[in-house]
Image (cartoon, rainbow, N blue to C red):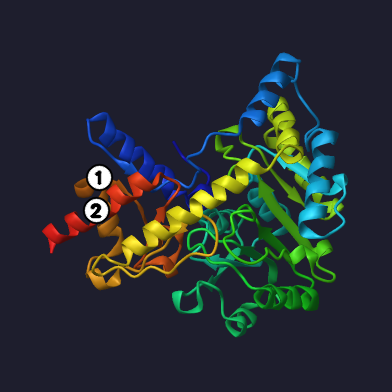
Amino acid sequence: MRFAERMSQLGTETAFEVLARARALEALGRDIIHLEIGEPDFDTPGYIIDAGAKAMRSGHTHYTPAGGVPQLRQAIADHISESRGIDARPEQVVVTPGAKPIMFFTILALLNPGDEAIYPNPGFPIYESVINFVGAKPVALPLREADDFRFDPDEFRSLVTDRTRLIIINSPQNPTGGVLTREDIEAVAEAARERDIMVLSDEIYEQILYQGQHVSIASLPEMQSRTILLDGYSKTYAMTGWRLGYGVMPEALAEGVTKLMVNSNSCPAAFTQQAGIAALEGPQDDTAAMVEAFRERRDVIVDGLNRIPGFRCARPAGAFYAFPNVQETGIPSKELADFLLQEAGVAVLDGACFGQYGTGYLRLSYANSVENLQRALQRIQEALSTRQ
């Protein structure tokens, strides 16, 4: 079979590959502790499940408008207006099956071959993958441990050129758990205003924040018209399998992204959209309790990792990932991740899966029970002691 050349430019998300390898070991009888996949281990709140089930029984099983039903778009606009302090309108909302299509469609709609897009590195691998796929040039913006996994503003400014058409930011951040400050975001906004550059702001972990207040770049002066705000339900409401996300963007771009939805997915699932309305308009107690549980787990895993010889782990301010530096173990991070899966039965990710600046780190998702986190830490320490 002969594939189109563009397919060679498309990357992958390694978490799913490692998950498949871990499941294969489980099928052979191995006990594996899963710290590789980035999804909450909590169940979707009951009131959301009830809304989805009621919607199916009530006939919400057919096509909907490509960009989402009007009631959900209005609910999202209201939520974003209140949570981000902006005036969002339903015409600016596009609902998609998961939040990833907003990344894909935005990059597809805005970038021509030869254009440049700045993206965080280490960062979610789909950014670089899709930039390459459309023939544009990915420009890595380093996030360094010494800077709390924020970027250096001067280095950022040096990367902006006349060919820059898109800047991608993600805060709270995957894989590091880092959080950008208002000053960081203002530096991006200044460059975007000066050169009329669009910004894709990935805010999927907005509510999983352990200190301070989330600052959306869309709320800064003159930035709502230059921002694509990405959010969704997978992390906040433990709805990964429901596949429901959205983008809030200038209306002209929303029309283009909706056209891409027509050409690809037709529309999001009807009953999940009804569940999405219930999620936003219902009680938020489950989300708050989940974040507090993540805070406890964060402290357990960070403290435990810092007791393992050769590991050094910063305390993340958001999301649910630990990103320890493992260079002092003397074991390359890819080799170490493979070793921990095979020998310790702990599935983690090599930091290099998230870009060149992730080399020498591991990503561990602490969306697991405290008991399992403690077991994983013990297994890692024991396996390394036998190897060394």
In the depicted structure, whether residue 175 falls above or below residue 16: below
> Element at badge 2?
helix
Which residue was labeled with disc 1? Answer: 345
Mark linked to residue 378? 2
Q: Nearer the viewer, residue 95 or 53?
A: 53
Quadrant hosting residue 210: bottom right
Mark linked to residue 82? none
Q: Which quadrant would the N terminus be assigned to in this image?
A: top left
Q: Identify the residue at image location x=53%, y=65%.
A: 317
Which numbered disc, 2 or 1, marks the residue closer to the eye? Answer: 2
- Spatial CA span between label 2 and label 1: 11 Å
Q: Contact, CB < 8 Å: mark 2 with mark 1?
A: no
Quadrant hosting residue 97: top right
The percent coordinates of residue 257 (x first, y second) are: 76, 46
In the depicted structure, whether residue 62 falls above or below residue 216: above
**Residue type at mark 2?**
Gln
The percent coordinates of residue 9 (x first, y second) are: 50, 54
